[in-house]
Image (tube, rainbow, N blue to C red):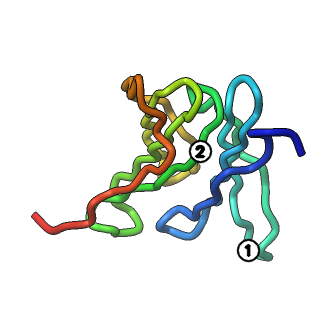
Amino acid sequence: RGHNVGNSDINLHPNQKFLYAAMRSPNPGLIGVWAIQDDDSLELIQHISTGGHIPRNFKIISAANRPNAACWLVVGNQETMKVVSFSIDNATGKLTERSSISTHPYKPCNISCFKGSR
């Protein structure tokens, strides 16, 4: 494996029906989306650009941690110094890019979220 190549993170959707994996492809980084079938096999649903290079880490954020609440995937692209957010379609698992922000001159290497109450 070369430097900054390979998978970087893997997470399940809160409804446990979809699996997401970040891949540190040289240009651009990718998120793979798979549907988890009834027999626990995986069906590829989507590959989508992370909007930058070397996705280091990502989090899936769900409002109130309810399975059918709105969900977001937020990824930090280490080498392009950019954080990108995607909305998640809870029915299909597909991602849609919604926004991005530069973190220059800092590399976003660990995305975290606050799970407080409002």
| Comparing labels 2 and 1, the label whose residue is closer to the camera | 2
Q: CA distance from mark 2 to mark 1?
A: 30 Å
Quadrant assignment for the C terminus: bottom left
Q: Residue furthest left?
A: 118
Q: Residue furthest right?
A: 1
Could you tell me which secondary element the residue under label 2 belongs to?
strand
Asked if residue 55 lies left or right of residue 67, the reply is: right
Residue 44 seen by the camera: yes
Dividing the picture into quadrants, the one containing residue 55 is: top right
Question: Which circle marks residue 56 in the picture?
Answer: 2
Q: Position of residue 14 (x, y in %)?
A: 47, 67
Towards the viewer: 18 or 20: 20
Q: How many marks?
A: 2
Residue at point 79%, 46% (across, down): 6
Question: Which circle marks residue 63 in the picture?
Answer: none
Residue at point 34%, 52% (across, down): 70
User: Are discs 2 and 1 less than 8 Å apart at CB?
Assistant: no
Q: Amino acid at mark 2?
A: Arg
Q: Position of residue 115 (x, y in %)?
A: 26, 66
Q: Give the vertical position of 109 relative to 82 (above or below).
A: below
Could you tell me which secondary element the residue under label 1 belongs to?
loop
Dividing the picture into quadrants, the one containing residue 32 is: top right
Residue 100 seen by the camera: no
Q: Amino acid at mark 1?
A: Asp
Question: Which circle marks residue 38 in the picture?
Answer: 1
Q: Residue furthest front?
A: 105
Q: Position of residue 62 (x, y in %)?
A: 36, 59
